[in-house]
Amino acid sequence: MYERFCPPLGSEATASRVCREADRGSRVRSVELSRYDLRRVAGRRLLALLLASCLPIILAGCSGSTVASNSSVSGAFQINPSSVDFGSVSVGSTGTANVSLVNLSSSPVQISSFTVTGSSFSVNQGSLPITVPAGGGSYNLSVQFSPTAAGATTGQITITSNATSGTAVVSLSGTGAAVVPSVPSSLTCTNNAFVAPGTDSCTVTINPAAPSGGTTVNLSSNSTALTVPAAVTVAAGATTANFSATASSAVATTQAVTLTATAGGTSQTFNLQVQTANPSLAVSSSSVTFGNVVLNTPSTQVVTLTSNGAQAVTISSASIAGAGFSISGATFPLTLNPAQTANLTVQFDPTATGAATGQLTLTSNSSSGSSTTVALNGTGVPSLTGLSCANSSMTGAGTDACTITMNAAAGSGGFAINLTSSNAAVTVPASVTVAAGATTASFSATVASVSTAQTVTLTAALAGVSQTFTLTLNAAVPTLGVSTSTVSFGNVSVSASTAQTITLTSTGTGPVTISSATVTGAGFSISGVTFPLTLNPTQTANLTVKFAPTAAGAISGQLKLSSNSSTGSSTSIALSGTGVPVLTAISCTNSTMLGAGTDSCTVTLNAAAATGGFSVGLSSNNAAATVPASVTVAAGATTGSFSVTVTAVASAQTVTLTASAGTVTKTFTLQLNPPTPTLSVNATTVSFGNVNLNTPTTQTVTLTSTGGTSVIVSSVAIAGAGFSFSGATFPLTLSANQTATLTIQFDPTVAGAATGTLTITSNSSSNPTATVSLTGTGVQTYQVSITWQAPTSSTDPVASYSIYRSPSGASTYQLMATVSSTQLSYTDTYQIVNGQSFDYIVESVDSSGVDSVPSNTATAAIP
């Protein structure tokens, strides 16, 4: 410490430090895993067991057996079934069943005899001995059950052979069912009415069929005008017998007759009329229905005209009505003698789809009426032109989407197309309906797993026209199917996420195992399934793929599944998506516009635009403010600028500017006001501060036309000693947004404060007389020279000197200057208004910045 030559200052300096701490944020992303419940389908395991148990029956030719309950396995020589139950068989009838003898040994087996017990049982054995070949050879033994009395009975077949297992026994059982008596179930005749004399053909029907020896049915008529045989016999095994009802002579009046057939206490009756001999016309049908007929494909039916009276009948004319209907085959007038017939051909040739009706009218001298009508109806249907399915071959179980096609649209109510499959491994609906107005209909073909390759023919039929499709079924193999080979997420907002589901399906008939799944590509991830994963046939699992872009731009990736699929050990699914910024704001420099002009606007994104930039659509709801159709945010930028062009409006209006990108829209409201003469002055006061006497100084005042139209400044006046202005000539017209600058000068001639006023007169809609206050102070400049001596007794070298000044009598000093250690003087220049004195002190400063105590005080008095 060196010796100071100056007394202490008595003032302290304080310092403060302001520390700011930045919060650091973090974001935690949560991925929710969903567990897929793998459920075992019990029915599929049961199917496998049933197929396994049927195998011996298939080898033995069991497809022809009516009863197959179990099998007897005796070493390698098998009897299937080991017991036969014929169930209920009518007495006098015979039931038949097959017993398969299968030789699974490596040597032939010779059957020497079949011994049958039970009087109602027998076998059709062929010539003995019988040799059954080795290695799966078989022999079918036909067994009969012919009960002679009602009731249950049993028996057995003893099979003697040289098989190592020796003699085999097949148990037999059956029940004789009592014969139910046959009784009449109906009695019908060809005609409900006929002209006497004549005959009518009749039929009696019994139930059940007549037993051995036939069934006698008694016949009777309640009128002597019509006679029948006393009885008729239904032959054994038959259910019907025919007889004739005869009217041997003419009758004077029409008579109602009832015929009766009786057997076993049961009777059936038939009512008919025996008519007098008159001209009478009979038609074979009162209506002709063509059903569905393909468009432009004529279909015909025959109507038979018969003279069924005792005199000739004359048909004078025949007319037909109804679109598509016509007749041919006869010329009118036409005379038919008694019992004579004529065939009239009725044709239906539709030209349009839908139901059609018509009528055939016959005019004659028939005693039953001069006019006979036959109703006609039919439906025009399109032709079936095609049958196709999505897949021409299927592996394992699944469904195939199929479509039938017609050459014209279906009419009201639609059309039912019959469907069939040639193979039970593929099932289709019995029919599919083409909707009204449509030409196609879709259906699904359900495919079951097969163990060997097979070909199936699907057939669609409509109105006699059929179409086929051939489907090949391949043997079962483990196969992995994925619902899609590509997953495109499209545009996804940065910092958002979206997910899609990929369905994994076992499309073969064997279980498929997916050992692992890997995903590549920034922002892509998977969840929902744990690997390894085994899927049984038709079983599915849903794999969730998520895309959460962190930056803008196109991103691609890949999901790779490793499995034992027959289609390949690796299945790849392409992933793609584009991260797009999100529009967060639209803003403009001005929220209010006066008259015509432009406003600078900006759109803002939450992330930088990718290569090629990012387009934001723009629109205005008011023609007075126009914007570009879009603005492009440049690649790497988060904002894009554009200008809105405003035209002058006659009245105040509000404009909504809209920016849109994707599904996000942002708006900005701009107020448009009509132009009015408005003068704006940039200052209400001008202060010159201290100005040396007789030393002019200037400042400016700017006048601006801000009302969107011209403003006239008629005059400008200035008052106050020392103040003047220049720069413009008045009157002055300022166009919209035009400015004028006035130069204000202050040139004081006496010391002291001075004030003045600048008055601006105009036609401004607001403040037509604007005033600007003027102030300034005239001052005199003085200089004070200060000198000091360097310390001589200090061992701490001086690095610099600090000079301080304070108005006399004050306790606070102001640092005026810092000078080097070699400078021992300083000149202070300052302005004062009135007589004033100042105090000065000096401090020495060492190289560490430590100040000495202040020097003595020196006072400078201004006269």
Image (spheres, helix red, strand yellow):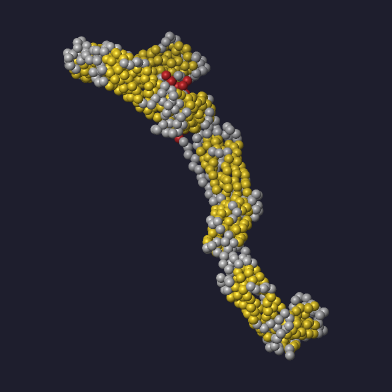
Q: Quadrant of residue 259?
A: top left
- Furthest residue in direction bottom, as rendered: 863
Residue occupying image coordinates x 43% and y 18%: 100
Image location (x, y in percent) of residue 640: 63, 56
Closer to us: 565 or 550: 550
Image location (x, y in percent) of residue 261: 22, 17
Question: Is residue 347 toward the left or the right of residue 189 in the image?
Answer: right
Can I make out residue 642 in this image?
Answer: yes
Above or below, 415 relative to 717: above
Image location (x, y in percent) of residue 194: 24, 15
Closer to us: 138 or 500: 500
Q: Quadrant of residue 289?
A: top left
Residue occupying image coordinates x 23% and y 18%: 367
Image location (x, y in percent) of residue 860: 74, 88
Which image quadrant: the C terminus? bottom right
Above or below, 639 relative to 51: below
- Furthest residue in direction top, as rendered: 127
- Furthest residue in direction front, as rendered: 731
Residue occupying image coordinates x 65% and y 52%: 635
Can I make out residue 666 in this image?
Answer: no
Question: Is residue 373 toward the left or the right of residue 389 in the image?
Answer: left
Above or below, 479 relative to 453: below
Residue occupying image coordinates x 65% and y 73%: 730
Closer to us: 323 or 332: 332
Which image quadrant: the N terminus? bottom right
Question: Is residue 424 toward the left or the right of residue 269 in the image?
Answer: right
Q: Quadrant of residue 62?
A: top left
Question: Is residue 752 toward the left or the right of residue 440 in the image?
Answer: right
